[in-house]
Amino acid sequence: MAWSKLLSRKRLGETFVETSDAEIPAQNRTSFQRDFDRIVFSSSFRRLKDKTQVFPLFNNDYVRNRLIHSLEASCVGRSLGTIVGEEIIKRHSKSLRDYIASDFGDIVAAACLSHDIGNPPFGHTGEDAIQEWFKSARAQPVLQQLNLQQQADLTEFEGNAQGFRIITQKEKQADRIGMQLTYATLGTFMKYPRESLISSETFQQYQGKSTAKHGFFQAEKNLVEQIAAEVGLIRRDVNSAWWCRHPLVFLIEAADDICYHIVDLEDGFRMGYITYEEAETLFMTLLKEDNLEYLGSDLLDNIKYLRSKAIHQLLLEAKHVFLDFESGILSGEFDAPLTSVIPSANSLKEIVDITRRKVYESCEVIEVKVAGYEVLGGLLEEFITAISQEQLSKSYLIKKLLPNFKADDESLDLYKKILKVTDYISGMTDSYAVSVYKKIKGISLPRGGK
């Protein structure tokens, strides 16, 4: 892969190439800054404010939601991308003379900002709930009408694939096709550039982090083909829609992992599941002999300070690993999370293990997970039945509740109709999902009057 192609400023759905940023007056936004702004002003991004990160949102106004996590990851991603970009430009000065270090930072920041935009309500449990419903006996009459690839899209439903669908098609203004982000940002967004169903013989020949999930649905497969061709991704298998990662994916993954694990430790302390002594000790294993003269008597302030120092330390380690493995990343041979090979990898794993045991398995977190299965499973049952069993009187009424289902959509094939349902449900906030579920189930009824 070549950096000059990987950093394409061309936009999906447009036939022209934007003016080189080097030719734009300094007061104007660059192509990649425009990507960032388009994501910020999208309604899908705004709805992340009421989507669970780990803790239920109604109990504490301090802990992070998906919106805050995305913003924090974006900040770390911008810093990481920029310091990496400085060195990459030095190494490839001839081919990258039209780029500056902050271009790398802006691309990574935009991709980080949108990395959770397709996540359904109730955190990762929402993904599990959707997968399990489509694997259940109730869904089989519907699934049997789809091909195997379409079935896999649903039984292995992925927030990453839903996010790609949102930014490339569903979230749009005027006559745009999706947000029309640059190919560089779209390539960086795809953490898992493969389709959902790949033959076991092919799949078993390769082990790497990018195989863990799929990153797009069959409905968007042609768009991924375009993006991969434009930025020059390496195809892993000629018979499958499966590519090596865009190199900058490793930076958004690192920014996400760093924020997720370090911030969950801080939130766990705030919620009382992790003691101050435990949190301080875990942070100190990352910081080692770093200068910590600002620690004082306020325990909360100390944890905030240690959290910021830990993030900075991990960011620098991720930068060095990326630069050390640059050639392997560009060739597609390197496919591991940066945080798994940094010097502090074992210390970070210890933090993950403790937060998983003490935070993720806490009673109130489990309550949210159980509610997610009940609510999303119930909504899928009602809406999928409505679009697939149209002879039922109730189906006619339920379809009226699908705001994105129009009269013309009756002519769509079943797979596309189902995606209309998953678009609607995955786009819900936690509170809206509960509200719709209660109304459809008759648990609560809308009040009359104006």
Image (spheres, rainbow, N blue to C red):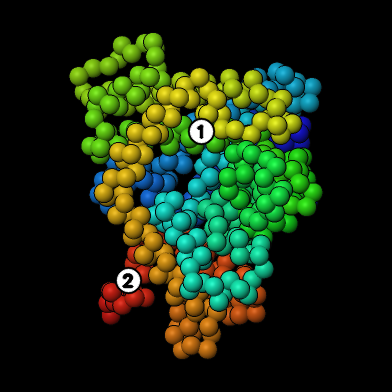
Classed neighbour count for the residue bearing mark 1: other residues with Cα under 10 Å, few (<14), some (14–19), many (≥20): many
Going 41% across and 42% down the picture, which residue do you hit? 68
Going 66% across and 65% down the picture, which residue do you hit? 148
Distance CA(mark 2)–CA(mark 1): 37 Å
- Residue 438's tag is 2
User: Which element is circle 2 on?
Assistant: helix
- Residue 255's tag is 1
Classed neighbour count for the residue bearing mark 2: other residues with Cα under 10 Å, few (<14), some (14–19), many (≥20): some
Note whether residue 13 is visible.
no
Which percent across, then down, holds residue 167?
A: 59, 53
Which percent across, then down, holds residue 170?
A: 59, 60
In the rendered view, tell whether residue 253 sits above or below residue 149.
Answer: above
**What amino acid does circle 1 point to?**
Ala
Relative side of 336 to 301, left or right:
right
- Which of marks 1 and 2 precedes in the sequence? 1
In the rendered view, tell whether residue 208 sits above or below residue 198.
Answer: above
In the rendered view, tell whether residue 12 sits above or below residue 382.
Answer: above
Going 55% across and 57% down the picture, which residue do you hit? 156
